[in-house]
Amino acid sequence: MNTRLQKVLTGLALVVGVGALVSACGSSSSSSSGGSGASSSTEIPAHVKGGTIKAAMSGNIDYLDPALAYYQTTWQIEYSTCVKLTNYPELSGDAGRVIQPEAASALPTQSADGLTYTYTVPAGKFVFSNGQPVAVKNFQYALERDLNPDQASYFGQTFLSDIQGAADYKGKAGTHVSGITVSGDKLSIKLTHKDAGIVPKLSTPFACAVPLDTPIDSKGVHTIPGAGPYYIASYTPNQAIVLKKNPHYTGTRPQYVNEIDYTALTLSPATSELQLKNGQLDYSPDGEVPADYYQLNQQYGPNGTWGGQQRFFITPGAILEYLAMNTTRPAFKNPLVRQAVNYAIDRKAILQPSGYGAGVPTSLYLPPQIAGSSDETTPYPNDTANLTKAKQLMAQAKQQGVTTPITAVLYTCNQQPCPDRANVIQQELAKIGITVQIKQFDRGVQFGKEGTKGEPFDIADEGWIADYYDAYDFINILLNGSNIPATNGNNFSYFEDPKFDAQMDAANLLSGDARAKAYGKVATDISTQAAPWAARSFGTTPDFFGPKVGCQVNTSSYGFALNTFCIRS
C-alpha cells in the first residue's frame, strides 16, 4: 500500500493500492456498479481539438519523480508522462493487464538459466519533451538512479535488490551496476536468482526513462522531461501541477487536449464534488464524499437520471484492505489472539462507512485478479462475525499466558471514512475483551509512523493496491521478514518467520501454474497459522467527472488514463 493506498483509504472504500474490490466480485475491472466507461481507446466521441482539462486533488501528492512517486494519483500522472521498456495498454478489464512492448521492440528474451533478460531498445523511437531522443542508456541510467543509495528510492531498495551488483552499487560517477549492461541497442539485466516478476516490475512507473542529466535527489525532481504523450510542465508545491502535450511525442497513445491543469492539490472533497457537478472542475481523482456515492451513482452513473453521458464510475481494482496486527508488541504477539480478531470482526459492518459500492468483504489475502487467489482458502467468515470461535481462541490464549483484557492502539487516517470505520472496529473488538484506543493522523503521517520500526501501535488500518499483477507484490513485499527496514517499511505487522520467509522465497522461484499454486498455499498457511492480518475487503475506486469530459478509458493498472481525456463537442 503502499502510499498508493492513500486514495483508497480516504476515499470510497477505495481502500487501497491497484485494486481488489473489483476482483473480489469475480468480475473484470471493466465492470462495476457504476459502469466502466469506454472500454478501449477506439471508442472516441465527437470532441474539440485541444483545450484544457481543469483538475484538482484532495489528498495532495507525494512526488512527481519516477524514482520516488508512489501515490495512486501520482502513478496516474506518471502513466501519461512516462515511456517504459514495456507497459500496460489503455484498455479495461483483463486486456489492460497484458504487458506490451513500448520503448523496447519486443518483450525481453530470457537466458537458458532464467537469470538474464535482454531488451532491444531502438534509438529515437521516442523523444523527450525537451527534444532529446530516448535511447537504451536512458533506461540503464533510470534503473541505476533507482539503485543509487543517495536517491533513496523504495523501488530500488525493494524491487531491484535481486539484480546482480545492486547491493554493492554506490552510485559513483562513471560506475555501473554489474548486472545492468548495455551493448549497442541491447539492455541486459542479470539477476542473482530467478524472479518471474521482473518484467512486471520493470513495467511500473519506477522504470520510466529519464534524461541522462537528471539529478540524484532524495527529495525528488518534480519536472523531469517526459517522453510519454504529456510531460510535467510545472509544479507549485501544495498548489498546482500543469501537464502539457509532449510536442515531440512519436508514439501511438492518444493526446487529445493541450493541457491538464491541477489547479488545487488539497481541495476538500465536498468542494471538489460541488465544482464537478456544476462544471467548474472537469476531474478529480479523489474528490468525492463517500456518503454521496449512492446519490452520485443514481444521478450520474450508467443509468443516471440527469440525462447526459455517464460521469460517475465505480471500478473494482486489485485492492486489499486489511488490519495489520503488530506481532512484536504484547497485544498481538500470540497468534491465537490474532486468529480471534479474524473471527470476531464483522467485515461487512467495517466496510459500510466507506459508502455505496465500496467493495466486497473478504478474509482472503490475494485479490481475484492475482494468480494464486483461486488456490487460497480461509476458515474466517467474510461478513458476519463468529464470536463463539473468537472467544474460544481468546480463552486458549489466556491459558498460554496472555494477559486479558487487552488494550490495543489503532492507527488510522483522519479523513472519512477512516474515523467511522475505526469506531466500528473498536466496537467489534470490545466484544472479545480487546479495548481499542484510536489515534488519527494525516494519511502520509500515518503511513510514515506505521513504517517506523518500534512505533507504539498495535493495529494499522491499511490497504494495498497492486503495483503489478503478481502475488509477490502482496505476500513477499508486505509479509517477508527480511524486508523490515528501520523506516519506510510496508510490513506493518512486523511479521518475521523464517519458515514462511523460505516458503515465500521458494514460490518466487517458480513460474506459471506452479507459481500460482505455491502462492495460494503460502497465503493460506500464513493466514490460518500465523494470522498477522485480518483481511477485511477487496476495494474499488470511484471517479467523478465534470460535464464536458469525454473519451475516458479506465485502465486496469492506473485507473483513468489522463492522456485519453478529451473535451466533448
Image (cartoon, rainbow, N blue to C red):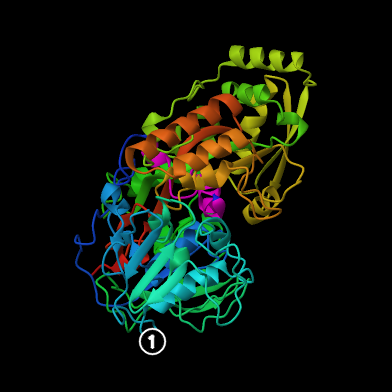
Instruction: Give the magenta range.
Output: 2-24
Which percent across, then down, holds residue 49? 25, 77
Which percent across, then down, holds residue 240? 53, 73
Which percent across, then down, holds residue 130? 41, 86
Identified at 59% across, 33% down, the residue is 499
Q: Is residue 85 left or right of residue 47?
A: right
Say whether residue 13 is magenta.
yes
Identified at 23% across, 61% down, the residue is 41
Q: With respect to residue 123, does 119 lie above or below? A: above
Residue at numbered disc 1: 132
- Quarter of the image with the C terminus is bottom left
Q: Is residue 5 left or right of residue 227?
A: right
Residue 522 visible at all: yes
Q: With respect to residue 243, does 299 lie above or below? A: above
Q: With respect to residue 94, does 408 lie above or below? A: above
Say whether residue 552 is magenta.
no
Residue occupying the far front of the picture: 113
Give the quarter of the image for residue 426.
Answer: top right
Identified at 61% across, 66% down, the residue is 168
Which percent across, then down, holds residue 406? 76, 25
Residue 354 visible at all: no
